[in-house]
Image (cartoon, grey):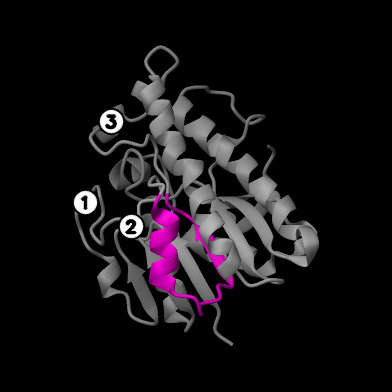
Amino acid sequence: MPSTWLITGVSSGIGLDLCRILAARGDKVYGTCRTRASSLSNEDKISSIEGDLTIIEGIDVADDGVGEKLKAALGADVTLDYVVHNAGTANGARDVPPADIFPEQSLANVTSERMISAFQVNALGPLRVQQALTPRTKSPGGKVAVISTGFASISDCTSGGALAYRASKAAANMLGKCMAVDLAKDGRGIAVAMIAPGMVATEFGPGYEKMKSFGADPVEKATAQIVKTLEELTIENTGKFFLVKTKLDEVVEMPW
């Protein structure tokens, strides 16, 4: 039986490819985005995806009004099997050249404005969206993913830097862990996973070509494993932090 998914941040990268593979296999997908055109390339790729995909435009997870917009767009009768909090940012800004995104986040350079803007998207975004969608998430049996990053691991941080990105994503991990505890209570039975997709070539951060030069893998190597991880997620292993090892086609538990 087809499942119903809601995925945030679908105009490019991981969100776009998740829509592609899920719609192609016959699932119902609601994909949210600020605009259909990618913020970096200005290309509209989401509109060409075939299948049962409903695109909800005008959704900015950094906006406190996002919950009401989502509820209005979905209506009262939609029940979601899966919610994927994928919308994210490297820095919370759209006017910084890719080459400067991480240098401006060094200990010497990062500003409180940059820290706050990253938190608004990466940490508060999933909170705003989940608060609105919990009543529409299947209970028991629903599943929630927070798309994380290896940069969010505190114990694995050996290189420093990228302060706004690291800290906001670490906060998102804590939010996801708390959601896992709260959504398992009182018979709700909704499981939550934090999933780092590994190093994949998308427009995110420094951009597609730069990521390829770093040896990043095709995005579908991550998305296939994200879907598999969510399908295998249960209330018994809720609240874990997983890493997709794209070169090995496997998923391992990531240290916090």
| In this rendering, the label closer to the viewer, 2 or 3 | 2
Give the quadrant of residue 137. Answer: bottom right
Quadrant of the snapshot with the N terminus: bottom right
Q: Marks 2 and 1, Cα distance to the nearest angstrom?
A: 9 Å
x then y, percent, for residue 63: 38, 47
Magenta residues, as a range?
65-87
| Residue nearer the viewer, 74 or 198 | 74
Give the residue number, with chain letter if any, for mark 1.
41
Amino acid, disc 1: Ser
In this figure, which residue is indicated by the disc labeled 2? 12
Contact, mark 2 vs mark 1 (Cβ under 8 Å): yes
Earlier-in-chain disc, 2 versus 3? 2
At 32% across and 59% down in the image, what residue appears? Answer: 11
Question: Do the residues bearing badges 3 and 1 touch, measured as CB atoms within 8 Å?
Answer: no
Q: CA distance from mark 2 to mark 3?
A: 19 Å
Residue type of the residue flagged with mark 3: Ala
Mark 2, other Cα within 10 Å: few <14 / some 14–19 / many ≥20: many
- Which label's residue is closer to the chain start, 2 or 1? 2
The mark tally for this picture is 3
In percent of width and height, residue 186 lies at 79, 62
Q: Residues within 10 Å of mark 1 (few under 14, many from 20)?
A: few
In this image, 43 relative to 126: left or right?
Answer: left
* CB-based contact (under 8 Å), mark 2 and mark 3: no
